Image (cartoon, coloured by chain):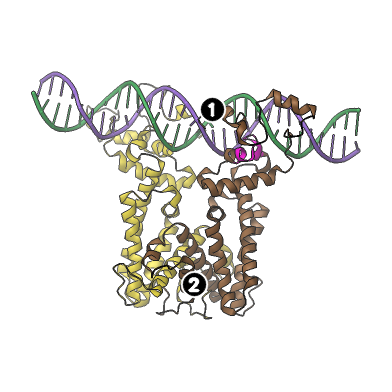
Chain colours: A yellow, B brown, C green, D purple
Amino acid sequence: MAKTDTKGESTRGSRAPRRTTPTAASRASRRATSAKTETPYHHGALREALLQAAERVLERDGLAGLTLRAVAREAGVSHAAPTHHFGDLTGLLSELAAVGFRQFNAAMASSCNAATTPLERALARPKAYVAYAQAHPGMYGIMFRTERLDYSRPSLHEAAEASFAGLANAIGMMRQEQISGDALTLEQGAAIARAWAMVHGFTTLLLDGRLKDILERLPEGTTAERLLEAMLTAPIATKLPV
Amino acid sequence: MAKTDTKGESTRGSRAPRRTTPTAASRASRRATSAKTETPYHHGALREALLQAAERVLERDGLAGLTLRAVAREAGVSHAAPTHHFGDLTGLLSELAAVGFRQFNAAMASSCNAATTPLERALARPKAYVAYAQAHPGMYGIMFRTERLDYSRPSLHEAAEASFAGLANAIGMMRQEQISGDALTLEQGAAIARAWAMVHGFTTLLLDGRLKDILERLPEGTTAERLLEAMLTAPIATKLPV
DNA sequence: ACCAAATCTTTACGATGTAAAGATAGGGGA
DNA sequence: TCCCCTATCTTTACATCGTAAAGATTTGGT
């Protein structure tokens, strides 16, 4: 793994064979030029391939391992290829986060649709929220690491906005009010903030391992999901929930 | 700032009062012990100076600008000096996070002591929590960026643990129960998780700018602190708080 | 006074992001 | 059909970063 830069990217030594990585070989058969194992100079769908490679790298090596060059290696292209499609690292991360938000929204939507009873309906979204984060910790981590993202990118802005709209909408339905337009009462805002903060906070604390102490002291075999449920449904013992 | 590595660090004479000359000359004159203004080879309290420099760099340039070399420049020492005191970047960040946790705990403690009425007592801690994060966003950010920290370091572990213990204790007092020892009921755990998740979630969402949309739609001049208060004290409109 | 250990600097190396120039294909007009 | 234009991808280059290793300097113990 400690290969030097130039060697690792197939630059200097082997001049003639352009791409010898396994991923490149699989791509070669797609292009029917003259039955050659050579990969085409033009990938054809590199943008998508890079995003998929980035997701693999992220979930495998964590955020620290998610570099432009690592993604390029994973996709079997030169280290500078991603720049052309995403501009810079922030661009790649932003587009990847957008993918994450879309997956995330889809997961919550399908989970809500599957719910039948009112209790199920109320818990479906938070549970799906936490479940997605647990299943894709890397993606979730990047989606909320704002200092590395560029929200002016339309794809990310839209996907994230849709996520928030779904939440606000769900709260509104639960309160049987019509939350729409531009104005909110303090109570409505507080309800949205409470719901979002509670679920988001629980999720980040959970992923950061900070709930481990609590979980270990709970009755044998209590899962995070069960704790989430209890947190959301437990009667308020005092006037203040905190 | 576009100089080469070695030149950029030590020739950078104008930066700090110390270490103004390249190499041999300064060493020679320092040897003579005639000039009192000359910087000694040994700093004397470099560890503390580096931590303070790191905090300055963090709040000025953000987490992205917080590098070992930047901290060394800020402190006016060679780029490798921090390594000796902190081992590596993770070590520096961990010690800095420990400083943050201590500041954080102190702020909450003093705020709780100043409270008189029961309502004040209940809100003092969350308010201090959010206030610290708003006043020191960089420090707060690093304190919860677990993938860059090493919790096996005693100073960090202790400071963070004290923070959690204070929280659990406050919840216990509010519920007028004795939360101690090792066992927790599901309800107790849920209460702690709820309080922590709510405040921590609110804080991270606020710092990430994600509550801006909500705040803008609230009645004119509603501050984040007011929203926090409403979130914590508002009556639960439905059976489920979410 | 002297030597070992601690502290700080120099030097060096691999990795990364990014800019710029070169190579290669695909596609549209003459 | 041929040719050139443009998008796509590769090479090359460079500044910065983390970190290891070795050298320089001071401190402190004996």
Secondary structure beneath disc 1? loop
Sequence-first disc among 1 and 2: 1
Q: In this view, does A139 lie to the left or right of C29?
A: right
What residue is pinned by disc 1?
Answer: B4
**Which residues, given as a range, are shown in magenta?**
B71-83
Q: Residue at x 31, y 55 (%)?
A: A158
Foreground pick, B237 / B191: B237
Secondary structure beneath disc 2? helix
Which quadrant is home to the C terminus of chain B? bottom left
Q: What residue type is labelled 2?
A: Glu
Does residue B54 appear in the picture of this structure?
A: yes
Instruction: Report, in whole angstroms, how far the alpha carbon at label 1 lies from the one at label 2.
Output: 52 Å
Q: Residue at x 41, y 80 (%)?
A: B239
Report the disc number at residue A150: none
Q: Where is residue B6 in the image (x, y as percent from the top left)?
A: 59, 28
Q: Is residue A70 above or below residue B55?
A: above
What residue is pinned by disc 2?
Answer: B229
Q: Is the magenta stretch mostly helix, strand or loop?
A: helix
Bin the neighbour count of mark 2 within 10 Å (Cα to Cα): few under 14, some 14-19, many 20 and up: some
Q: Where is residue C10 in the image (x, y as percent from the top left)?
A: 65, 26
Q: In this view, does B237 lie above or below B205?
A: below
Q: What residue type is labelled 1?
A: Thr
Foreground pick, D1 / A143: A143
Q: Position of residue B192 (x, y in %)?
A: 55, 71
* Residue A227 among magenta residues: no
Subunit that carries the residue with mark 2: B
Does the residue at mark 1 contact the one at mark 2 (Cβ under 8 Å)?
no
Q: In this view, does D30 lie above or below C24?
A: below
Does residue A102 appear in the picture of this structure?
A: no
Q: Position of residue A162 (x, y in %)?
A: 32, 60
